[in-house]
Amino acid sequence: MDVSGITTFFTTLLDTGIKVAAGVAAVSLAAAGFMFFGVVGHNQRAMEMAQTGVRAAFLGLGFVWGARQLINLVAGAAGQPTLH
């Protein structure tokens, strides 16, 4: 059974997802940094929201990179070549 088309599809999908997640995380970190250091002054609530934004950006990026490792683990267990 030839699964090269499916493998190519998921490889492309995962690579695109990682690129989009990295872009979104970068924009989110920039916005949170601007909010934290530039605008808030002494507003405690805004500082907490900025910290939450930073945490969410790193968690989202971690989930996407973790998905890549999980796919490599499953592919290796199935005897397929892993993604690079």
Image (spheres, helix red, strand yellow):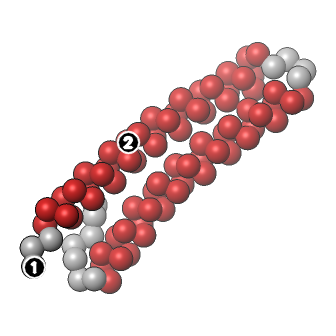
Q: Tell me residue 33's x, y (percent).
A: 67, 27
Q: At x 33% / y 54%, what residue is drawn? A: 14
In this rendered view, identify the residue nearer to me: 61 or 13: 13
Q: Nearer the viewer, residue 5 or 22?
A: 5
Dot 2 falls on a residue whose secondary structure is helix
Q: In which quadrant of the rendered image does the N terminus lie?
A: bottom left
Residue at left offset 73%, top offset 41%:
52
Q: Quadrant of the C terminus?
A: bottom left
Left or right relative to 57: residue 9: left
The residue that mark 1 highlights is 1
Question: Image check: 44 left or right of 6?
Answer: right
Numbered disc in front, either 1 or 2:
1
Name which residue type carries label 1: Met
Q: Quadrant of residue 6?
A: bottom left
**Which residue is denoted by mark 2 in the rendering?**
19
Which is more N-terminal, label 2 or label 1? 1
